[in-house]
C-alpha cells in the first residue's frame, strides 16, 4: 500500500500559457532581483519562508523541504476537461495539452493539419505529413 498524498492542482489559464523564462521578478520582501520567477520563488520560500498554497511551484519547494512524498495532479482549467477529470502528472504535460487542445491553432500545413504551436507544424511537415510521403515516391 502506498501512503502517498495526492494533491490536486488547478492552475489558472494564465499560469499555463505564461512563459516563465522571459519574465523578470523581484522579491517583494527584500527587493532582490531575479532573472526568472522560479529563482525568485525559491528565494522567497527558502529565505522568507513565504509560499502561496495555490502556487504550485511554491508548494512544491515547501514540500520538498518538509521531506514529504506528494504526487501532484495538474488539472486543465477548460470546462470540458474538468468534467472529464483529466489530470496530468506535471505542469509541462498540462501546458503541452493546453496548447494542443485549447489554444487557437494559428499554424497550419497545406494538408489541413493545424496546431497552436509552430514547432508542431514544422515537425509535422518534416516527418508526418501525408502530402510529403505522397510527393516523395
Ligand atoms: Zn527576499
Ligand atoms: Zn484541456
Ligand atoms: Zn501536412
Image (cartoon, rainbow, N blue to C red):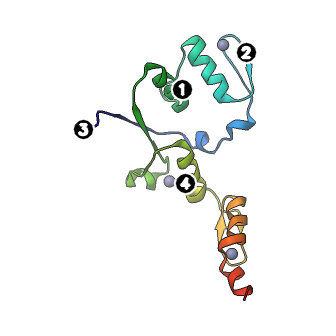
Does the numbered disc 2 mark a residue whose Cβ is under 8 Å from ligand 1?
yes
* Marks 3/4: CA–CA distance: 31 Å
Per the image, the residue denoted by label 1 is 58
Assess whether mark 1 and mark 2 are in contact (beta carbons under 8 angstroms).
no
- The image position of residue 110, as x and y in percent, is 73, 77
Task: Tell me the quadrant of the picture where the C terminus can be found.
Answer: bottom right
* Marks 4/1: CA–CA distance: 22 Å
* Marks 1/3: CA–CA distance: 28 Å
Per the image, the residue denoted by label 4 is 97
Tell me the element at label 2: loop
Assess whether mark 3 and mark 1 are in contact (beta carbons under 8 angstroms).
no
Tell me the element at label 4: helix
* Marks 2/1: CA–CA distance: 17 Å
Does the numbered disc 4 mark a residue whose Cβ is under 8 Å from ligand 2?
yes
Dot 2, how many residues are within 10 Å of its Cα: few (below 14), some (14-19), or many (20+)? few
* Marks 3/2: CA–CA distance: 45 Å
Nearer-the-camera pick, 18 or 125: 125
- The image position of residue 32, as x and y in percent, is 73, 15
Amino acid at each position: 500500500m502506498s501512503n502517498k498524498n495526492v494533491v490536486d492542482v488547478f492552475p489558472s489559464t494564465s499560469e499555463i500559457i505564461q512563459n516563465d523564462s522571459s519574465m523578470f521578478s523581484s522579491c517583494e520582501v527584500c527587493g532582490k532581483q531575479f532573472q526568472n520567477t522560479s529563482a525568485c520563488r525559491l528565494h522567497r520560500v527558502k529565505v522568507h519562508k513565504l509560499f502561496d498554497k495555490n502556487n504550485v511551484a511554491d508548494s512544491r519547494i515547501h514540500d520538498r523541504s518538509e521531506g514529504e512524498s506528494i504526487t501532484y495532479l495538474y488539472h486543465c482549467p477548460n470546462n470540458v476537461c474538468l468534467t472529464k477529470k483529466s489530470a496530468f502528472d506535471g505542469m509541462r504535460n498540462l501546458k503541452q495539452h493546453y496548447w494542443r487542445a485549447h489554444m487557437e491553432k494559428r499554424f497550419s500545413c497545406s494538408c489541413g493539419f493545424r496546431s497552436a504551436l509552430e514547432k508542431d507544424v514544422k515537425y509535422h511537415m518534416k516527418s508526418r505529413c501525408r502530402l510529403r510521403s505522397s510527393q516523395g515516391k
